[in-house]
Amino acid sequence: MPCFRTHGLLCVEEYDFQFVVPFHNGTWPEGLPQEDILQNVKCPCTYIKASTSYGGDGVLYCANDDEDAAKVVSLIAGCRKVETESSDHDIHFVYSKQFIGISKNFYDEIAE
């Protein structure tokens, strides 16, 4: 089985490594009106929530913990949350069949 973690290296030559600094030091949301942005989403959406997982060093291994995910969903009118057993940031690549299934179900619901 190929190592899925290396697919990001395909575009490493174009990657700006300074992009990750605010994520690493926790400053990325400073000055960003997240609640306003989320409340202004006017289209149907599905929030895919990876299982909450922390590393031994206390680092959160998914985008949001359960409390933050609930807040995101509450701020977007009509947002549907789908929880997954995986805890991988790259679900669309690592768990592509699951991601496609969730996306297809979402499309089928809004197409009615």
Image (cartoon, rainbow, N blue to C red):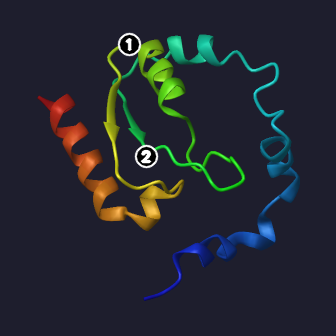
Where is residue 57 drawn, in percent x and y? 72, 53
Residue at the limit of the structure toward the front, as seen here: 56
Q: Looking at the picture, how far across and down is residue 94, in whole percent? A: 44, 66
Q: Position of residue 38 (x, y in %)?
A: 54, 18
Q: Is residue 8 left or right of residue 104?
A: right
Q: Residue furthest bottom?
A: 1
Q: Nearer the viewer, mark 2 or mark 1?
A: 2
Q: Which residue is mark 2?
A: 51
Q: Residue at x 44, y 22 (%)?
A: 70
- Residue at the spot of label 1: 77
Dot 2 amino acid type = Ser
Q: Amino acid at mark 1?
A: Ala
- Name which residue lies at 81% across and 23% down: 30
Q: Is residue 78 left or right of residue 56?
A: left
Q: In the rendered view of the protein, which quadrant contains the N terminus?
A: bottom left
Which mark is first along the chain, 1 or 2?
Answer: 2
Front in this rendered view, residue 25 or 67? 67
Q: Relative to 10, does residue 88 appear above or below in the rendering?
A: above
Q: Give the crowd class for mark 2: few <14, some 14-19, many >=20 residues within 10 Å.
A: some
Residue 42: x percent and y percent? 42, 16
